[in-house]
Amino acid sequence: MTHILKARPRLLATAVLAALTLPGVAFAQTAKERELEARVAQLEQMVQQLVAQQQQTETVVTEVRTAQAAQPAPAPVVAGTGAAAPIQTTTITPGANPGTKFTVGGMVRVDGLVTKTTDGDIAKGTAGRDFYVPGAIPVGGDGPDTYSDAHVKFSRLWFDASTVLDSGDKLGARIELDFFGGSLGNTAATNTYGATLRHAYLTYNNWLVGQTWSNFMDTNALLDSVDFVGPTDGVVFVRQPQVRYTSGGWAVSVESPETTVQPFGGGARVIAGDNSAIPDVIARYTHKGDWGHVSFAGMARQLKYEPVVGAESTATGFGAQVSGLVKLGDSTDIRYQLSGGDGIGRYIGLATIQQDAMVDSAGDIDALGGWAGYVGLRQVFSPKVRGNLFYARSQWDNEAAWTGMGVTRKVQSMHANMIWSPVPKLDFGVEAIWGERTLESGADGELIRLHTMARYSF
């Protein structure tokens, strides 16, 4: 390399000399020859300077490359740094265990209803105006009435935290709210409502402690309804504090005791002010397969009523249930639930249909017997359209001499709906509802309703 660089100036000088001297061969011995030789010498000096500069530059480049090769590789760019850095670089749960996963979700839901009742109207501001409540169907009122309602009370927000410790133990917690609380405004202006606690519980491995759905309720068999509940006449629907242990298909719980009572001679229900000292005990077994699932549950409870101090009366309540989901194909399934027993009234239909116990003429209570159930067909017509058809009913064994003739003997309803989901998590639904409530006297009242819903879940 060095030899080639040294030869370059002499070759270049020779070429330049040849170019300059060829035209003046005929004048070789003229006075201009000495001037040309001087110019050639000057050009040769300039070329040597250029070669020296080139060598110096190559030396510097080599040194830089050597230094770069000796340096450690640069650290990889971390996602979320620089221009894309998060607004908050620390955890939003600083008091939680390391590695805790915190999530938030919910839904915005808008309900619109048009209702016709045959025997008077359902009182404004009550639950029966917001969704189907069979116990609220008027009977013996002053003729038919038609009215409409709209609200966003069933919009929901939940927070969840879960952790897997180094020991392998699993911890979790959940708080969920909706806005079905008492009115804080009025429908003429603000339509504001208080936030309502739905769920608040913690989990530790197989244990659950806190408020959530009762173990006597099979949530996996619930129907796909536009109405907030759907088959309210026959469904078990209770949220309450409890301690539950789950292992495989088994779940056993002890849950908050509460007794609802039908006073002697009729009248509004009474919620016992002095709870039983014994919690409700519930056991459930669920078997699952590719075809769906079937679940069996049993409950034992003590009913307690003390209308005046020292006049305590107790009774034993029990219940049994079978429920499940059967797949008839990739797009069709049947869902069902059948419950029966004595003293299960509080667990059926949001405790709005019947009571746990009746009071006799001596002031003692006796568990009220009855049964409740529903069956429904769900059909998915396309990835964006599905429909449901279902029937629900409950019937009760009132002792008319104690309860009077104005208590509910049975309720039943039919529902048909269509739900359209143009994009994931967005649902628009419409449901036609027919409901009937029959009293012990034989008098009845009917409800006809068109319920619409728009819901975005996130």
Image (tube, rainbow, N blue to C red):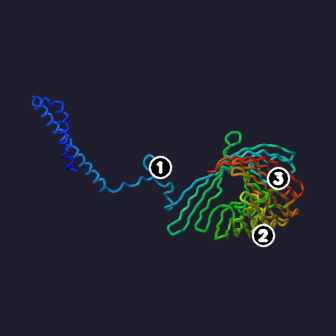
Q: In this rendering, which labeled residue sits more in front, label 1 or label 2? A: 1
**Front residue (pair 46, 117):** 46
Kindly identify the residue that appears in the image at 49 percent across and 57 percent down.
94
Q: Nearer the viewer, residue 306 or 175?
A: 175
The total of numbered circles placed on residues is 3
Q: Where residue 435 is drawn, which disc sits there?
A: 3
The kind of secondary structure element at disc 1 is: loop
The answer to which of marks 1 and 2 sits earlier in the sequence is 1
State the image coordinates of residue 223 (x, y, percent, origin top left).
74, 57
- How far apart are the two marked residues, 1 and 3, measured between alpha carbons? 53 Å
Determine whether the residue tagged by mark 2 lies in a helix, strand or loop: strand
The reply to whether discs 1 and 2 touch (Cβ–Cβ < 8 Å) is no
Task: Name the residue carrying label 2.
Answer: 315
80 in relation to 344, above or below: above
Eyeballing the image, is 127 above or below 12? below
Q: CA distance from mark 1 to mark 2?
A: 61 Å
Residue plotted at (45% across, 49% down):
85
- What kind of residue is marked 1? Pro
Numbered badge on residue 86: 1
Query: Residue 405: x percent and y percent?
Result: 88, 58
Residue 336 visible in the picture: yes
Q: Secondary structure at mark 3?
A: strand
| Residue 257 visible somewhere in the drawing | no
Residue 183 point in image, percent of width and height: 69, 47
Asked if labels 3 and 1 touch by Cβ distance under 8 angstroms, the answer is no
Whichever of labels 2 and 3 marks the residue nearer the N terminus, that label is 2
